[in-house]
Image (cartoon, coloured by chain):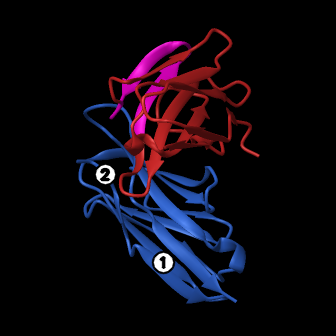
Chain colours: A blue, B red
Amino acid sequence: SQQGEEDPQALSIQEGENATMNCSYKTSINNLQWYRQNSGRGLVHLILIRSNEREKHSGRLRVTLDTSKKSSSLLITASRAADTASYFCATDAIQGAQKLVFGQGTRLTINP
Amino acid sequence: DSGVTQTPKHLITATGQRVTLRCSPRSGDLSVYWYQQSLDQGLQFLIQYYNGEERAKGNILERFSAQQFPDLHSELNLSSLELGDSALYFCASSARSSYNSPLHFGNGTRLTVT
């Protein structure tokens, strides 16, 4: 299966701390995307990183991609209570069925 | 607001019944995707349409079908419903048929089968 796997499954930190989530996948990819989902709501796109990119920033978000290890990480700096959500990575394989496959997600809780 | 509209927001129905979920994509987007999210299976890709044509198929049951109309809105039909079909059903849209651009998700339809 190509499905990405996030690690940890759940993360609880204090407001102001940094949060790091990891994603591993199994097959070669074109792109990797990170999404956020607030409870019961639709997913919101955060960052797309292409297979030839190693790092990307967007505000307090930093994403890295290591294609040799088939892994990515999402770093949220100076966390806020509003960052409480589930975070998913999604990958599209170079070969095989064209679909965007989501991992099981990391549930992030920011404690005030 | 993602610009993707899904109706209804909630749906409660009985086993064996048939329901239709509706999705209006973001203005200008040609691709529509359907995903099912349940606690035990996570977010599962069902099907993708691009400009009216089926583009990719995922783990969609034979009891489920979908289509995209000329005005680009899409419908997901679920029939012979079972308790296990209870889930959140998301529609997403994007400008292109490939995955090198973000997907924009609606807020989903919560289906409860009793």
Query: Residue at the location (52% across, 19% down)?
Result: B50
The question of residue B103 being in magenta is answered with no
Q: Position of residue A39 (x, y in %)?
A: 61, 62
Residue labelled with disc 2: A3
Query: In the figure, is residue A71 to the left or right of B1?
Result: left
What residue is at 45 percent from the left and 66 percent from the top?
A64
Residue at x 72% of width, y 43% of height: B2
Nearer the viewer's eye, disc 2 or disc 1?
2
Which contiguous range is marked in magenta? B45-60
Mark 2 and mark 1 in contact? Answer it, CB < 8 Å. no
Cα separation between marks 2 and 1: 20 Å
| Label 1 crowd bin: few (<14), some (14–19), many (20+), radius 10 Å | some
Between A24 and B6, the residue placed more toward the observer is B6
Residue A74 visible in the shown view: no
Q: Report which quarter residue B81 is drawn in.
A: top left
Residue nearer the viewer, A45 or B106 = B106
Which quadrant of the view contains residue B21?
A: top right
Residue B98 picture location, percent across and down? 47, 30
Identify the subunit bearing mark 2.
A
Query: Which element type, helix, strand or loop, lies under badge 1?
Result: strand
Query: Which residue type does callout 2 highlight?
Result: Gln
Q: Name the residue beneath numbered marker 1.
A: A20
Q: Residue furthest right?
A: B1
Q: Quadrant of residue A22?
A: bottom left
Same chain for the residues under marks 2 and 1 in the image: yes
The type of residue carrying mark 1 is: Thr
Residue at image location 49% in from the left, 21% down from the top: B49
